[in-house]
Every structure is written in structure tokens, then in C-alpha cells.
Amino acid sequence: PCRDRSKSRGAGAGAAKSEGEMSIADALEMSRKAQMVFETAAMAQERRHQASALDFDRQLAERDRSLLERNEALEEAERLAEERQAELDEKLQEIERMEASAAEG
């Protein structure tokens, strides 16, 4: 009878060890899966960060383009204003000459 008990205990101990090994294996598998989820989330966050940075760069480029267009438009308006001022100066000089000529005559 004593011998049967030790065999019985041995079988029980072996079964407990087997269950413990499964538990460790399950824990390792869960840890591996958690690590994969974490890495996937980190990659997704990095992609979102890159997309945000690209969107910000795109917005800056659009703003720069808009500012450049405004600057070009202002330069064109300034050039046209200078041309118009030159035309008005010529007409004023012509009128002054005509007035001087009429005063002499």
C-alpha cells in the first residue's frame, strides 16, 4: 500500500509539473503576442506621426507657395504703379511746358 501511494504521488507530481509547464508555455505565448501587439501599435503610432509630419510639411509648402504668389503679385503691382507714375510724371511735365509756353505767348 505504501508503494502504491508513492506511485500515486509520483503521478500526481508529474501531472502538476506538466500543468505548470503548460502554464509557463501559455504565459510565454501570451507575452510574445503582447509584444507583437505592442510593436504593431508602436509602428502604427510612428506611421501616424510620419503622416502628421508630412501633412505639416505639405501645409508649410502650400503656405510658402501662397506667400510666393502674393509676393509676385505685389511685385507686379509695384511695377505697374511705377509705370503709371512715370506716365503721369510725363503728362505733368507736358502740361507744365504747355502752360509755360502759353504764359510766354
Image (cartoon, rainbow, N blue to C red):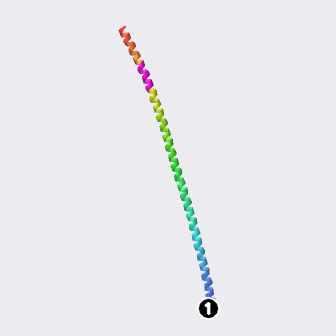
* 68 left or right, relative to 16: left
Residue 23 vertical placement versus 63 (above, below): below
Residue found at the far bottom of this picture: 1
Helix, strand or loop for the magenta stretch, by majority: helix
Magenta part of the chain: 82-90
Q: Position of residue 39 (x, y in %)?
A: 55, 61
What residue occupies the far top of the structure in this picture? 105
**Residue drawn at (38%, 10%) of the image:** 102
Please say whether residue 70 is one of the residues in the magenta stretch.
no
Residue 88 is a magenta residue: yes
Question: Please, what secondary structure does the residue beneath circle 1 have?
Answer: helix
State whether residue 86 is above or below residue 62: above
Side (left or right) of 33 relative to 73: right
Hey, which quadrant is residue 92 in on the image? top left
Please state, as top left, top right, bottom left or bottom right, where the N terminus lies in the image.
Answer: bottom right
Please identify the quarter of the rendering in which residue 4 is found.
bottom right
Q: Position of residue 52 (x, y in %)?
A: 52, 50
Q: Position of residue 45 (x, y in %)?
A: 53, 56
Left or right: where 2 falls relative to 59: right
Tell me the residue at 58%/65% (across/down): 33
Where 31 falls versus 54 (above or below)? below
- The structure residue drawn at horizontal position 63% and vertical position 83%, both measured from the top left corner, is 11
Q: Residues within 10 Å of mark 1 (few under 14, many from 20)?
A: few
Say which quarter of the image contains residue 78.
Answer: top left
Residue topped by disc 1: 2
Q: Looking at the image, which residue is at 49% across and 38% down?
A: 66
Specify the quadrant that holds the C terminus.
top left
> Which kind of residue does numbered mark 1 sit on?
Cys
The number of numbered badges drawn on the structure is: 1
